[in-house]
């Protein structure tokens, strides 16, 4: 009898585990980290992102997919998480081998954190599915997410950097932005703006580097060289000195509200007309439409001025790759869904119509829908904005940086922690500060910290 009770207990436990497993399987669609099939036959795919607008884009993409794929219906469940929380959670899930979503947005500066071992990237290789689309995609944006010859993510946009001018201020100062061809011209125009209107020409970021890196990129330089930190190179030092001089020497710029130009505090200041211009990528159009309503019809967009003859007039800044994780329950379906939603003409067009992004599929730029007068971005900026962006993209004026180099997260963190704030907030010497940044960053790269 003493031996029968344990056998009954074990048998009961096994039955309980089987029932529990069946129950959990049936409820799988409610598990944000899993995927299953719904009662009506749809495959549930879980996605994480950190941008609400991206979530809206993917909900629309799922509706489009289901209309054209009646036998492969998708039930897409999208979660919008705070930036830091999402990447911490994603890293833990991928490292532990469980708990990751099927699909995730990975910001370009974070991407290298997942590709340190090229033989063990935790994302699905999209190369085969992307192959038919590659001739029409902007190569630099594809290269950003290519590791060992395999493409692991697909961006939303080109991110072409431009200058947005508040024409109310520029007209008051008597300046046509089209006459500003060089960064020296920009300083002279800024001095006139300050003298005649009392307004600042622009702002300088203290905890972000988008303006600085766009200027570095347009001069064919980089912040990484041979796997080491390269901030103190001659070109980079000269560039950062230029930005510091806008504030401390020429007095035509002030420090950005909130430290960077992509936050609501700064949006409010620009909307009030405190600045004559802002240097940001094309994706910043959505911020203006959503947060700067007073400036509708008053913004003119131009390519970036240049430092030297031969410089590019733009740079691809920022980006977010949509990836399929290696924990996706149906990797083939998730990959087809992501690729068709972003790389096809129809999908790429919606990055413009829904998000105001500059599409990565070059075929889209000649589609009449790009200048649809009912489009809110055309209504805000006017149709000429499409011609400006098309010219930059089709003429190869959009460069890039080593965003996805494994050293990028470390060297950028060192620069934004111990370089940019000191130089822009405390007027620290540019040359010695950047040399210190390089030394500390290289030590961290060697130690792995």
Image (cartoon, rainbow, N blue to C red):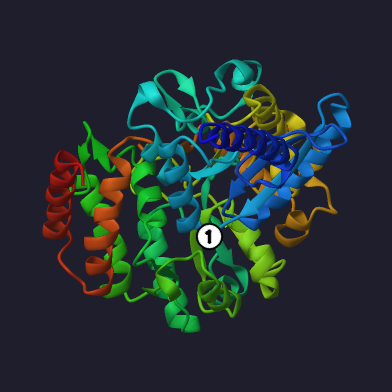
Residue 350 position within the rendered picture, expressed as x and y whole percent measured from the top left: 74, 42
In front here: 146 or 271? 146
The answer, for residue 438, to whether it is visible in the render is yes
Bin the neighbour count of mark 1 within 10 Å (Cα to Cα): few under 14, some 14-19, many 20 and up: few
In front here: 45 or 404? 45
Q: Residue at x 21, y 31 (%)?
A: 226
In front here: 381 or 194? 381
**Would you say 48 lies left or right of 190 here?**
right
Quarter-wise, where is residue 24 in the image? top right
Q: Residue at x 40, y 56 (%)?
A: 211
Q: Is residue 241 above or below residue 160?
A: below
Quarter-wise, where is residue 132 in the image? top right
**Would you say 33 lies left or right of 406 here?**
right
Residue 404 position within the rendered picture, expressed as x and y whole percent measured from the top left: 38, 36
Q: Is residue 258 above or below residue 310?
A: below
Q: Residue at x 81, y 26 (%)?
A: 72
Q: Is residue 93 above or below residue 243?
A: above
Residue 152 position within the rendered picture, expressed as x and y whole percent measured from the top left: 51, 28
The answer, for residue 355, to whether it is visible in the render is no
In front here: 127 or 220? 127
- Residue farthest toward the bottom in the current orientation of the protein: 198
User: What quarter of the picture does the N terminus occupy?
Assistant: top right
Q: Residue at x 31, y 42 (%)?
A: 408
Quarter-wise, where is residue 127 in the image? top right
**Would you say 370 lies left or right of 34 here?**
right
Q: How many marks?
A: 1
- Residue farthest toward the front in the current orientation of the protein: 1
Residue 58 position within the rendered picture, expressed as x and y whole percent measured from the top left: 71, 44
Secondary structure at numbered mark 1: loop
Residue that label 1 marks:
82
**Would you say 341 lies left or right of 228 here?**
right
């Amino acid at each position: 009898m003493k031996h029968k009770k344990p056998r009954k207990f074990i048998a009961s436990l096994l039955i309980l585990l089987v029932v529990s497993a069946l129950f959990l399987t049936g409820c799988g669609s409610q598990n944000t980290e899993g995927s299953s099939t719904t009662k009506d036959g749809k495959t549930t795919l879980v996605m994480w992102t950190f941008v609400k607008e991206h979530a809206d884009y993917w909900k629309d993409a799922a509706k489009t997919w289901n209309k054209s794929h009646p036998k492969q219906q998708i039930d897409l469940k999208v979660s919008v998480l705070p930036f830091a929380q999402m990447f911490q959670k994603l890293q833990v899930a991928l490292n532990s081998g469980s708990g990751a979503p099927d699909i995730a947005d990975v910001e370009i500066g974070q991407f290298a954190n997942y590709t340190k071992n090229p033989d063990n990237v935790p994302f699905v290789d999209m190369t085969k599915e992307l192959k038919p689309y590659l001739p029409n995609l902007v190569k630099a944006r594809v290269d950003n997410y290519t590791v060992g010859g395999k493409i692991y993510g697909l961006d939303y946009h080109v991110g072409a950097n431009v200058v947005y001018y508040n024409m109310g201020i520029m007209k008051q100062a008597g300046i046509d932005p089209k006459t500003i061809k060089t960064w020296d011209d920009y300083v002279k125009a800024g001095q006139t703006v300050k003298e005649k209107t009392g307004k600042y020409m622009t702002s300088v970021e203290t905890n972000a580097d988008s303006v600085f890196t766009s200027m570095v990129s347009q001069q064919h330089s980089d912040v990484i060289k041979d796997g080491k930190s390269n901030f103190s190179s001659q070109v980079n030092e000269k560039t950062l000195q230029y930005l510091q001089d806008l504030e401390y020497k020429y007095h035509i710029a002030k420090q950005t509200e909130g430290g960077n130009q992509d936050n609501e505090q700064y949006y409010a200041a620009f909307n009030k007309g405190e600045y004559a211009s802002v240097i940001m990528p094309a994706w910043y159009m959505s911020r203006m439409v959503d947060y700067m309503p007073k400036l509708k019809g008053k913004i003119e967009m131009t390519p970036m001025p240049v430092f030297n003859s031969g410089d590019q007039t733009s740079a691809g800044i920022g980006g977010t790759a949509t990836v399929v994780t290696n924990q996706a329950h149906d990797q083939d379906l998730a990959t087809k869904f992501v690729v068709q939603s972003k790389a096809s003409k129809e999908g790429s067009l919606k990055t413009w119509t829904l998000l105001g992004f500059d599409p990565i599929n070059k075929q889209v730029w000649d589609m009449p829908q790009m200048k649809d007068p009912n489009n809110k971005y055309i209504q805000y900026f006017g149709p000429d904005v499409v011609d400006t962006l098309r010219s930059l993209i089709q003429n190869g004026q959009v460069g890039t940086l080593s965003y996805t180099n494994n050293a990028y997260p470390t060297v950028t963190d060192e620069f934004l922690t111990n370089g940019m704030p000191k130089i822009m907030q405390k007027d620290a010497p540019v040359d010695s500060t950047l040399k210190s940044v390089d030394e500390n960053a290289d030590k961290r790269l060697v130690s792995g910290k």
